[in-house]
Image (tube, rainbow, N blue to C red):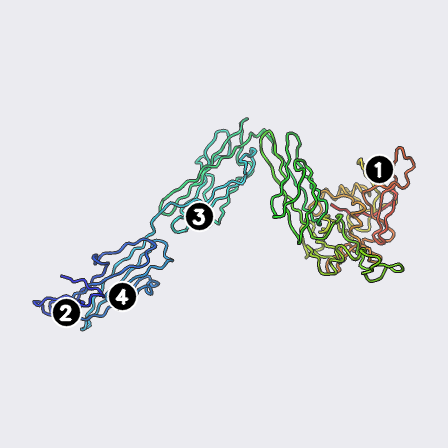
Amino acid sequence: MGLLCLLNLAACSGSLSSESETSEDVELKVAIGSTGKLGQNIRIPVGTEQIDIVSSVRGEDDTYTYIWSAQPALFQEELSDTTTETVQLSIPESVITDTNITLTLIVIDSDGKQASTSMLVEVFAPNTNPEIISFEIDDKDQVVHSGKGFSFQSEWIDAQDGQNVASAIIYVTPNAAVDGIPSNGVLTQFDTAEVSFPALYIVGENQFINKSDKTASLTFTLSVTDMNGKTVTSSPLFIDILPASLTSLTIDAGDAQTVYTGQLVNLIGEVSRSDNIEYAWLQSDSETRLDLDVTDSLALQFNAPSVDSKTLFELKFTATDVVSGISYNDFVSVTVLPIGIFDGMNDTGITNCANETSNLVNCGQTNLPRQDAEIGRDSAALNAELAKEGGGELGFDFTLLNQNGEEDFTSTPTCVRDNVTGLIWEIKTTSGIRAHTHTFSWFDESEFNGGFSGSQTSNSAACFTDTSLTACSTASYIEYINSVGMCGGNDWRLPTVNELVSILNYANDDDKLALGANNFQIWSNHAKASTPYWTSESSLFGVNDSESPETPNAWAVNLSTGDEHAHSKLLAGAILLVR
C-alpha cells in the first residue's frame, strides 16, 4: 500500500515498507499525478497559470534522488525544482492553443536502483465561435446598374486563438432574374491561409446581369468556420440590381489644382448626361472647413482659405440619377499654399527694385515701398520661405512629365506641369510633327474666334504634314495632339495671353522662358526673336467695322523679349499648347 509524500510533510520519510518484508522483497516503484489522482493524466484549460505535481515512491530506502523533466524542452525551465518530491509546472501566457506536455520522473535509491514514470498534461483551448469583425460592400446606397462591378471587404478572427479559420465563404442567394449567380450559391471562398485583411473580393464588370424589366435584389452573407467546426454567419447584405435597360452615368470632378490663400477656385464637374440628374459638392476631409455656398450645380466656386502651411483639401462631386436613385461619386483635390492673395499666375522673376533713376537697386526703398521684387513667390523663394512640389528658378515650380503624363526624371520629358497654376505645358521636340521650328496659321471655327476664323493654310507657315497632320494651322495641330493623347490628355488648347506669359521670367535676357530645377532649360531653343507664339485670344487691333467687328489679328507673345502684340491670323506663328 502506497503512502502519498508531500514536500511540506516533514514526518514522512519518502518511502513505504513493512516489517515483514525483507529488502529482497521490495521493488522500487514510483507514481506521479495531482493530489489524490496519482497515475492519471491532467487536463487543464488555456489560461491556467500553475499546477502542482506530487509523487509517491515505494522502495527499501528512506532517501531517494528525484530527477524531473518536461517535454517539449521549452517547458523544462517552467519546472520549479527538478530534484524534489513535489514540483510546480508554470504554464506561459504564450500558450493559447491545444498543447500536450509530457512530465517524467526518475527516482534513484541509495543502491543505484532506479524507476521512472511519465504523465501527460493536456492544455486545451475551450472552443468558442469565430468572430466576423466586418462584412461590408463598397456601394453605400447598395443599388447598382446591371453589369456594374462592386466589391466586398471582410475581416474575421478565431475568437479563441486568433489563428486562421478553416474556411470563409461569401454566399449569394439565387434570383432567377439575374444571370451570373453560381449554381451552388458560392460567390467566393477565400484562401484563409494566405488572406490579408481586410479581405477583398471584387464582383467583376458584367458578372451580374438583370435581364428583367424590374429591379432585382440579391442577398449576400459571409460564413466563417473555425478549425473545430464552429460556424458563424454574418448579417445579410442586400444589393439591388437595376434592369439592364437603365444606363449608368460617367462623371468627372476635374483635375487637381494648386492655389494660394485667397485665390478663387473654380471646379467644374462633367456628367455623361444631364436629364433627371441632381448635383452635389461636399468637402470630404481636412479639419479646416471650406466656405462652400452654392453646392448643387455642376460648377463650384470658393475662395481658398487662409492656411499656415501647405494644406490638401478633398472635395466629392456627386451626380444622382433621380429616376433610379443611384448616386455616382468622383473626387478632386485642391492644394492651398500659404502665400497671400494671388491671381493664379506665377511671379515675374524680377528680383531687383527701382528708384527714381535706376531699375537695378537694392530693395527696401522707403519712399517706394512694396515693389514687385519685395512680395510674392520670388521673394519667398530667395528668403527660403517657399515650399515646392517640384523645382524651378526663384518662385517657379515645375514637374517634368513623360509621354504618359507621369512624373519622370530619367527620360526626355514630353510635358511639364506648372505646380503654381496647375497648367500642363507641351515641350517641343527637335524634329518630327512636334518640332519647335514649325510654324502655323491661326484658325478657330468656334464662336470665340472674334468674328474671323483665320485660315487653314498660309504660304508663310511651315510644318511637317502627313496623314495625321493635314494642314499647318493651329486647329489641325491641336486636333492631332488631342488624337494621340499627349501626356495622357486630350484637352490640349492654345493658351491665353496671361497663361503664356505666366511661364516667363522677365529678368532673363534673350530667352524669357523660366528655368526648371538646377537651371534646367525646359523649353530649349523655343524662344526665337523673329517668331511669336500664338494665343487663343483675338485682338481688336485692326478692326474697321465697330458695328460688326471681324478681328483679323490674334494676340501673340515673343518668348525671346516677352513682348505681346497683335499678329495677323494669316501669318505664321509658333505653338506651345497647354491643358
Residue that carries the numbered disc 4 in the rendered image: 68
Query: Distance between the Cα atoms at labels 4 and 1?
Result: 103 Å
Say which label, 2 or 1, has the lower sequence index: 2
Residue at x 71% of width, y 51% of height = 419
- Is residue 110 toward the left or the right of residue 285 in the image? left
User: In front: mark 3 or mark 4?
Assistant: 4
Mark earlier in primary sequence (3, 1): 3
In this view of the protein, which residue sits in the foreground, 406 or 540? 540
Residue shown at 11% from the left, 70% from the top: 23
Q: Residue 192: which numbered mark, if any? A: 3
Q: Residue under label 1, please give it.
A: 450
Residue 63 image point, x, y percent: 19, 71
Q: Amino acid at mark 3?
A: Thr
Whole-percent x, y for residue 73 in the image = 33, 63
Disc 2 to disc 4: CB gap under 8 Å: no
184 sits to left or right of 379: left
Q: What residue is drawn where x is 87% and y is 36%?
A: 550
337 relative to 61, above or below: above
| Label 1 SS | loop
How far is mark 2 from mark 3, CA to CA? 60 Å
